[in-house]
Amino acid sequence: MSARSDIPAWRIVGDWWDLCSCAIGCPCNFGSDPTLGYCEGVLTWLIRDGHFGDVKLGGQNLAVVLVIHFEGNVMERNREFGFLIDDRADAAQRDALKRIFTGEAGGAFAAWRDLTISLDGVDFVPMKVSHDPENWRVEVPGMIEGLGGPYRKYMVPADDTCRIYNAPRPEVVPGFLTVGHAKRNRVKGAFGRNWDWSSRSSKHIAFDLRGPKAFSWRQSLKAQ
């Protein structure tokens, strides 16, 4: 996908984490198939700073939450999902976030769109999302109760975490990944999906994404 001339330069910076159905450690972190052969999860992007052209996206801790199901490998075209976007966003911010996350505005999300078979919808809803080193929280009233944090059960030094460098994560591109566990991962009725995968996998990566330049998973990030 080439950059369209009518799409402004954009950038979003913040924290991403997921809560999923895989065993803790998540084989998807290494490009392997999910533990159960399929994955169900809640993915959260908490935006600390950013812009879409002249539209400011930082300063409010706006969040975007994805409710996803896919069968097969994390790098295959298999995704079915819907987006929930923080309803505190104003009209211009809503338009910007929808265009970025659905892949219309290029960058890594355009490559993500190539892995998608079904977009269940984009809804603007109230939510409570927060992140600190110990608690990765996402709550959407009536739909999602989620809480993750670092996994430290075995041989992790005191006051430290288990991390993976350059894990192949198509949601945020490679980065320092903290291995976590889901203290709560309950979904009820979000885009017709229901589950309780509490006590399963979670993980966190700080992200810095931009567009609209085309993105490829197979090139060095520095070259893009």
Image (tube, rainbow, N blue to C red):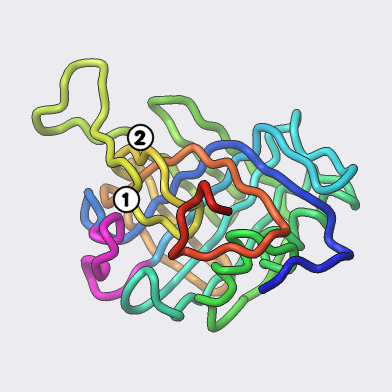
> In the image, 72: left or right of 207?
left
Nearer the observer, 57 or 85: 57
Residue at 69% over, 59% down: 213
Highlighted range, magenta: 27-39
> In the image, 202: left or right of 10?
left
Looking at this view, name the residue that lies furthest to the top: 159
Query: Whole-percent x and y of residue 98?
Result: 75, 61
Q: Residues within 10 Å of mark 2 (few under 14, many from 20)?
A: many
Residue kind at label 1, given as amino acid type: Ser
> In the image, 176: left or right of 1?
left
Mark 1 and mark 2 lie on one chain; the one further toward the N terminus is: 2
Nearer the observer, 215 or 193: 215
Query: Whole-percent x and y of residue 147?
Result: 42, 40
Q: Residues within 10 Å of mark 1 (few under 14, many from 20)?
A: many
SS label for mark 2: strand
Q: Any mark on residue 198, and which? A: 1
Looking at this view, name the residue that lies furthest to the left: 155
Q: Any mark on residue 136, and which? A: none
Looking at this view, name the residue that lies furthest to the front: 223
Residue at 69% over, 64% down: 106
Q: Quadrant of residue 197?
A: bottom left
Query: Whole-percent x and y of residue 51?
Result: 78, 42
58 vs 185: above or below: above
SS label for mark 1: loop
Query: Whole-percent x and y of residue 206?
Result: 49, 37
Task: Please say whether residue 28 is one of the residues in the magenta stretch.
Answer: yes
123 vs 10: above or below: below
Query: Which quadrant, please, contains the N terminus?
Result: bottom right
Residue at 19% over, 16% down: 158
Q: Any mark on residue 149, and which? A: 2
Q: Disc 1 to disc 2, how far (Cα)?
A: 12 Å
